[in-house]
Each structure stands twice: as C-alpha cells, then as structure tokens.
Image: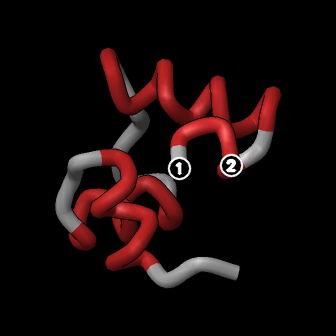
Amino acid sequence: NMSQAVFARLLNVTTGYVSQLERGVKRPTGPTLALLHVIKRKGIEAIL
C-alpha cells in the first residue's frame, strides 16, 4: 500500500486529485492516464 501523498508525487498531481480518482469523482486523462496504464501493466516499479 502506498499513501495518497506518495502516489500523487509519483504522478505529479495533488493528493486531492488522487482522492477524487479513488472516489470516482474524476477520471484520469492525458499523461496521468498514460502513467496509470503503465503502472497497471508493469507495476509501480516501472515509474520509480
């Protein structure tokens, strides 16, 4: 498990945005969506 703050830093977004993604309030777009696809396919280590 990773904190929202750390995950937000890795994605270069705010913790509030990560919270909104988790709650389904917002949907990722652009570079954030691309990074999430990489993480899903290859794991978080792919962007560390």
Q: Would you name the residue on which mark 1 appears?
A: 48
Mark number for residue 25? Answer: none
Left or right of 37 on screen, residue 29: left
Q: Is residue 9 left or right of residue 47?
A: left
Which residue is at the front of the view, 39 or 17?
A: 39
Residue 8 relative to residue 4: left or right: left
The amino acid type of the residue labelled 1 equals Leu
Q: Do callouts 2 and 1 mark residues in contact (Cβ within 8 Å)?
A: yes
Q: Which residue is drawn at 22% across and 70% down?
A: 16
For label 1, count other residues whose C-alpha is less than 10 Å away and answer few (under 14), some (14-19) or many (20+). Answer: few
Residue 22 location in percent, x, y? 52, 63
Residue 35 position, x and y percent, is: 49, 29
Secondary structure under tag 2 reads helix
Give, as a three-letter code, the residue at label 2: Glu
**21 relative to 46 in the view: left or right:** left
> Where does the N terminus fall, quadrant-wise?
bottom right
Q: How far apart are marks 2 and 1 (CA)?
A: 5 Å
Quarter of image, res 31: top left
**In the picture shown, does residue 46 fall above or below 5?**
above
Which sits in the foreground, 18 or 8?
8
Residue 14's place in the image compared with 11, above or below, is: below
Q: Residue at point 67% right, 50% down?
A: 44
Tally the marks.
2
Q: Where is residue 5 in the image (x, y as percent from the top left)?
A: 33, 78
What residue would you read off at disc 2? 45
